[in-house]
Image: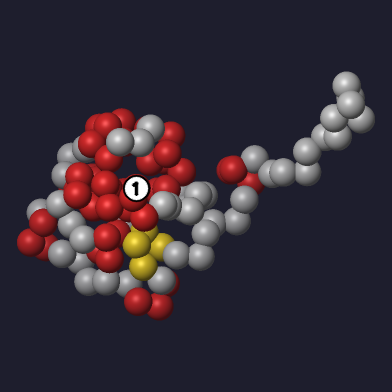
Amino acid sequence: MEYGYEKSNRKKLTDREPIWYENQVALYRKIRGMSQEELGKAARVSKSTIYLIESRLIEVKMSTALHLAQALGVEVADLFFSPEKKPPFRSDVV
């Protein structure tokens, strides 16, 4: 114990197992020609949050999912899904 605090057993975000659901945020971001920073600004989150979402390292709040979908011009269901129920690619958004 240092300075009265125990060392944390928490893992760094990058050491965590990916979350259970899949996402296509990077796919639609690249189709739109957007950088992670541009999407972050449009969706009202940081560039690092976009990285963590695309890497499946954090849970996504509903409000963030809605902002991402709006910024990318798709439905939330097009972005986030369970591995067994991958939505078809929406060619109408290209």
- Residue 9 lies, in percent from the top left, at 78, 43
Residue farthest to the top? 3
- Residue 94 lies, in percent from the top left, at 10, 54
**Which image quadrant is residue 7 in?**
top right
- Going by the image, does 12 lie left or right of 64? right
- Residue 56 lies, in percent from the top left, at 47, 53
Residue farthest to the bottom? 84
Please tell me whether residue 68 is drawn above or below residue 41 in the rendered image: below
Which residue is at 36% across, 68% downward?
81
Q: Secondary structure at mark 1?
A: helix
**Closer to the camera in the image, 76 or 53:** 76
For mark 1, what is the residue? 64
- Going by the image, does 71 lie left or right of 22? left
**Closer to the camera in the image, 16 or 74:** 74
* Visible residue check, residue 6: yes
Which residue is at 16% across, 44% downward?
32
Please tell me whether residue 81 is drawn above or below residue 94 in the rendered image: below
* Visible residue check, residue 35: no
